[in-house]
Image (cartoon, grey):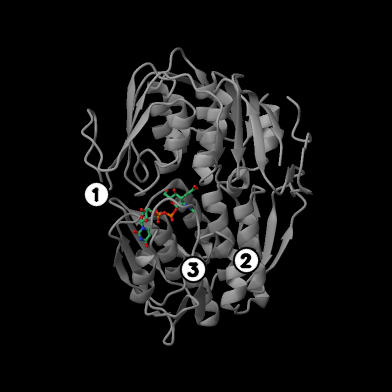
Amino acid sequence: MKSLLNVAAGAETIAKSGEKHVNGEVLAIRGGRPLTGRVEVKGAKNLVTKAMVAALLGETTSTLRDVPDISDVAVVRSLLEVHGVRVWDGEEEGTLHFDPSGAVAAHFEEIDAHAGASRIPILFCGPLLHLLGEALIPDLGGCRIGDRPINFHMDALRAFGAVVDKSYEGIRITAPNGLHGANIELPYPSVGATEQVLLTAVKAKGTTELRGAAIEPEIMDLIAVLQKMGAIISYEPNRVILIEGVDSLQGYDHRAIFDRNEAASWACAALATDGDIFVGGARQQEMLTFLNVFRKAGGWFDVREDGIQFRRGGAIKPVVVETDVHPGFMTDWQQPLIVALTQAEGVSTVHETVYENRLGFTEALNQMGADIVVHPDGIDAPGRRVARRALEQAAVINGPTPLHGADVVVPDLRGGYSYVIAALTAEGESVVRNIGIIRRGYEKFLTKLEMLGADFDVIG
Ligand code: EPU
């Protein structure tokens, strides 16, 4: 490869990871070469960012380990700093310390300026209400993958006794009479709303019973963090979580659970490019559902002590998959899998049931030669379980289709990753723009691609 240091234009910056990138963030990728080698995954983005918020609840300093150098972490770090939390790097790489003793309120504009496109400010509500009696939420961003409403969050906060006022600046939430335990049933096992309840209930007066909770491994790890801080949380069958509020919590010292979304992404990259990738830090337990589908799709894997090796086991086979909340097939796994399925010998179907608009990225794959038809209202497909929601988007992927280079713009985090993998699978050169979004959730992305033998240049 020509190396990512081969920069044609744009002002160079160096990320904390040491990875060089440019402001324009455009890659020229030459495909047709298998990705081969070893990559390491650190802590899960979807735990680390929440554990950082949890540090606000402690009366003493917290330490979080295996924190990836991704832009979503930088956003939460600056949001904590805006609220007066002192954050500093530990000696061990990927360690952050948080001292919340100087926590203060922040203004809408400051929060807005630091939140960027992130939806994280919403999870500051519970801790800030306990600490300061007030929380502000500006307009929320995040990946453009559907409406992404916050009604579950607001309803839960009201159940704890919070008052929610909407203004032109955003949402102001107060707790004039403090927060008390509540009986809450989520209409859908939302990850964020479950975290909202946990981060609020741990210090609310009395007991909270949460029904219809999300039980993703990252949520279980957040519960572990909160228990280390002094919280009393138990869970029961059928998505029930009980939280007994306590008066005070201490800091924690915690090593974050590995990022199974990143691990699954590299597994699909090995499958799509006919490569061989060892993902250091990946664990089997949290990936059982993914590994079943990977195997059915013709993938081969070997679980080892320090990670999992992924490659093809023969021809790629078509599969019927439906995304779901844990323990189902995660919505974040379908995009890289679909790239691999363009090379399958037959017709695959992927139903997206978690988000209402997360198959739009397939248009760019079609531009590269794929044959994918999105059915906005879903289709009957053999092997489907009953969908949990009335979201019925389905992608029918007709394979195998050789992919060719194209000029594409990254739409969101997981879609963006899949464009890069598609470009690496394709014959010829592709231009992939707006790759900065990928840095939201993939640490040292370009360095890892380079280590795996990808052939690309940073051109702007
Ligand atoms: N929803 C509502 N109302 C709400 C909250 C959610 O209707 O108040 C709906 C959403 O619109 C969506 C569904 O419920 O259709 C699921 O949303 P959920 O709240 O579970 O998602 P989230 O907490 O916003 C997290 C991850 C996502 C991941 C989902 C599902 C973080 C920061 N984000 O989002 O990760 O896809 O859970 O597992 O933890 C990513 O990593 O690329 C990413 C988008």
Give me the C-alpha separation between circle 3 and circle 1.
26 Å
Mark 1 belongs to which amino acid? Ala
Of pointers 1 and 2, the one earlier in the residue sequence: 2
Residue 302 at least partly seen = no
Task: Quarter of the image for the N terminus: give it.
Answer: top right
| Mark 2 nearby-residue class (10 Å; few <14, some 14–19, many ≥20) | some
Front one among 183 and 378: 378
Residue 220 at least partly seen = yes
Residue 147: % across, % down: 38, 57
What residue is pinned by disc 1? 390
Q: Element type at marker 1?
A: loop
Residue 455: % across, % down: 68, 25
What residue is pinned by disc 2? 114
Which residue is at 58% across, 26% downward? Answer: 424
Task: Quarter of the image for the C terminus: give it.
Answer: top right
Q: Element type at marker 3?
A: loop
| Mark 3 nearby-residue class (10 Å; few <14, some 14–19, many ≥20) | some
Q: Are marks 3 and 1 in contact (CB under 8 Å)?
A: no
Whether label 2 lies within 8 Å of ligand 1 gets the answer no
Residue 402: % across, % down: 47, 19
Q: Are marks 1 and 2 in contact (CB under 8 Å)?
A: no
In this picture, residue 16 sits left or right of residue 53? right
**Up/down of 267 relative to 223, above or below:** above
Q: Which mark is residue 139?
A: 3
Farthest-out residue, bottom? 176
**Up/down of 224 relative to 265, above or below:** below
In this picture, residue 180 sits left or right of residue 187? right
Which residue is at 44% across, 83% downward? Answer: 175
Whether label 3 lies within 8 Å of ligand 1 gets the answer no
